[in-house]
Image: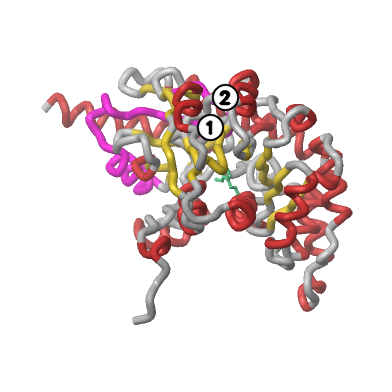
Amino acid sequence: MVKIKRTVKELDPYIPGRSNEDLARVYGLDPDNIIRMGSNENPLGPSPQAIETLKKSLHLINTYPESNIDDLKAKIASYARVNSEKIIVGGDGADEILDVLAKTLIEPGDEYIVHPPSYMYYEFTFGIHGATPVYARWNVEENRLDVNSVLNAISAKTKVIFLCTPNNPTGGLIEKKDIQTILESTDALVVVDEAYWEFSGENNVELLDEYENLFILRTFSKVMGLAGMRIGYGIGQEKLIEYMHRVKPVFSLIKLSHIAASATLDDLNYLKESTKLSIESREFLYEQMSKFPELRVFKSFANYILVEIRNTGMKSKQMTEKLMENGIIVRDCSSFRGLDDHWIRVSVATIEEDEKFIDVLKNILSDQQGISND
Ligand code: PMP
């Protein structure tokens, strides 16, 4: 057997949401009727303009993608209100930007700070590159960042600090003044993950003028409805972006993704509608789930809601399986560091799907009550 790299041998595999086909096979369901509330996707579907432009572009796939994507960078820059030199675009979503960051920055012995429970991919990618995680804390009870836990975790070895706002999976926001406090307390790169910022209306772009060590991470997978096209971007200081471009795979952003991203940014009606529908669904789900006394439902600024199901007497695995038997996927949060096996995350869907979910949930909870009372 060849000798495998230590960091890879020790790596915990990343557990992504499951596909419709996979679940349809296991639970004997029709893949087209599965309700997806597990991966924080866009229930509206992609922009119609993006679909039309893609159809007209399919014949282009025999040629390599553009290595010069200045047109897309310019559109993203104008959307984000920064200059183009501050933008890097990734072709495996924001996840690729994380990988490129690690490739650009990490040397043996470096540390990075995360605040569990949060997005697990930070640890997955940075682990491969041999960096050591140091754990700060997200205060789940109050759904806010424990800022002191971040400040206390900073050492001379800290290379990167991850701050996720709105935080996945809890949905809480980090206050701008807390981000500033952290930026001022370190020379490390502070990566503010704004994958879901559009659903909160709050972002931190203006801090880039003031702080050299700020980097903002974003994606086309959520409000832009293009999770399957794998497009993400980073916004940082010009010098860092230039170094990152040196290590980024040259052709990772395929031509169809380039075209879809560009068409979606032009489709202002879609963007408005997409934001509105997801927020409506989130508030509807919050209101409806809050009616079940055995659930603890967390206020969210994103397109998903964290729910503690401890008082139902069920574990997340049992609850997610019962929902799947009814064709509904939600996220079992037991793989998130910092949460045990009594939490689920419910992503927004169409209101019709939300209603179906609430009905199914009601039945599951009343069956469970029956069992508990027996
Ligand atoms: N950051 C956060 C907080 C996320 O939840 C996700 C996707 N689930 C990403 C980044 C990565 O997004 P993508 O790779 O799809 O662009």
Disc marking residue 143: none
In-image side of 297 versus 243 (left or right): left
Point 42% across, 23% down: residue: 139
Residue 346 in view here: no
Q: Is mark 1 within 8 Å of ligand 1?
A: yes
Point 49% across, 28% down: residue: 150
Judge by depth and name the residue closer to the eye, 26 or 93.
93
Label 1 secondary element: loop
Percent of width and height locating residue 230: 65, 56
Circles 2 and 1: CB atoms closer than 8 Å: yes
Point 81% across, 72% down: residue: 60
Percent of width and height locating residue 317: 30, 44
- Residue type, label 1: Asn
* Residue beneath disc 2: 173
Q: Is residue 64 above or below residue 145?
A: below
Label 2 secondary element: loop
Residue 365 in view here: yes
Residue 41 colored magenta? no
Judge by depth and name the residue closer to the eye, 87 or 64.
87
Q: Residues within 10 Å of mark 1 (few under 14, many from 20)?
A: many
Kindly report the distance in space between the C-alpha atoms of the residues bearing marks 2 and 1.
6 Å
- Residue type, label 2: Leu
Q: Quadrant of the C terminus?
A: top left
Residue 309 colored magenta? yes
Q: Is residue 181 above or below residue 30?
A: above
In-image side of 321 versus 349 (left or right): left
Q: How many marks?
A: 2
Q: Which residues are magenta?
A: 298-326
Q: Quadrant of the N terminus?
A: bottom left
* Residue beneath disc 1: 167
Point 64% across, 23% down: residue: 180
